[in-house]
Image: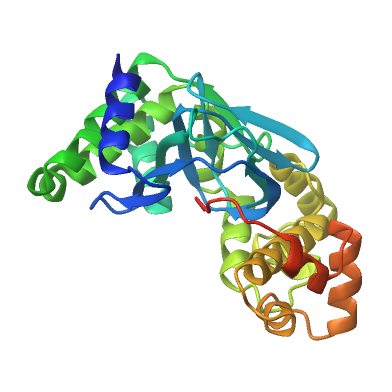
Amino acid sequence: MSQQLIQDIVARHLTEDGLFETGIAGVKLFRVTDPVQCAPVVYEPSIVAIVSGAKEAVLDGHMYAYDSSRYLCCPMTMPVEAGTPKASPDVPLMGVYVSLDTRGMTELIMEADRAVGAGRRGGQIEGGLALAEWDGAFSDALLRLVQLVETPRDAAVLGKGRLRELYYAVLQGQAGPVARQAFGVGNDIAQVIERMSAQMDETVSIEEMAAQVGMSRAVFHRKFKQATTMSPIQFVKSIRLNNAAMRIAQGTTVNEAAMDVGYTSPSQFSREFKRMYGQSPRQWSNAQQMPLSLA
């Protein structure tokens, strides 16, 4: 019932393809009717809940297919390939995108732990993405959040509270362990990724990243791969090239895109780009149709 009501709200506000700003920071409605094969994108920390159609994301060769039965939780900035290969006018892809605020999630985890007398939780992050079933708490919290779209005054007053309610439902659901590890106090790997993503044009070594969190190179490498499924070197290269591919597909020149993501050698950029995607950057710019960016 909640999903159908959410779908009705999305349909009322999006009669054409695109993103709809709800007036609540970080919350958007979306609609897609054009099929697009998976292409490189960068997902920011977020929840993507589908109410019609299906979407695909590929991380390090592993496919995450999700629809109205499961939502996607991306707790850290991640380089993925994403697309909407089954979208059509008859079966449009529709849903809700919710950005996960680092400070809000961390404070909520700390408060929840205090409430139940839990101590600081450590341990490793398991995987970079998570799929979770729409349980009753998540469905109801998302509906209550989306209903604010209909009343802008209520959205201004109640938006933060209902967003917090949704965050709590995520933490209590199947994606909770992954989200908790990514936003919990002392999560060193997620913090490194956040800093690195904000300084894409700066060259940083694995040793420097490990030193930031007080780990040896070997320990950092092991924990990083547990968290993201990729080695630090592979992750840095993937996130830079995915960012460059997105920029090129959106009209940025090849040289500008390369410089934006930290490459100083155009020839090195072209070699690594072609090795990653099977096309030169210029061939890519002429061939690609980018999926609707929800990141």
Q: Position of residue 42 (x, y in %)?
A: 62, 55
What residue is drawn where x is 20% and y is 34%? 147
Q: How many marks?
A: 0
Task: Examine the rendered structure and indicate whether residue 77 appears above or below residue 154.
Answer: below
What residue is drawn where x is 25% and y is 37%? 12
The answer to which image quadrant residue 212 occupies is: bottom right
Q: Residue at the left extreme?
A: 153
Task: Examine the rendered structure and indicate whether residue 203 appears above or below residue 272.
Answer: below
Q: Could you say which is closer to the camera, residue 192 or residue 48? A: 48
Residue 23 placement, left or right of 104: left
Q: Would residue 118 be seen by someone viewing this image from the given angle?
A: no
The answer to which image quadrant residue 234 occupies is: bottom right
What residue is drawn where x is 74% and y is 73%? 204
* Quarter of the picture holding the N terminus: top left
Q: Position of residue 149 (x, y in %)?
A: 20, 42
Q: Position of residue 180 (x, y in %)?
A: 50, 36
Which of the colour schemes (rainbow, by chain, secondary structure, one colour) is used? rainbow
Task: Examine the rendered structure and indicate whether residue 81 appears above or below residue 259.
Answer: above
Residue 228 placement, left or right of 4: right
Q: Could you say which is closer to the camera, residue 285 or residue 228? A: 285
Q: Position of residue 182 (x, y in %)?
A: 55, 43
Q: Would residue 129 be seen by someone viewing this image from the given angle?
A: yes
Q: Could you say which is closer to the camera, residue 119 or residue 232? A: 232
Q: Residue at the front extreme?
A: 90
Residue 153 placement, left or right of 149: left
Residue 50 placement, left or right of 194: left
What residue is drawn where x is 62% and y is 37%? 129
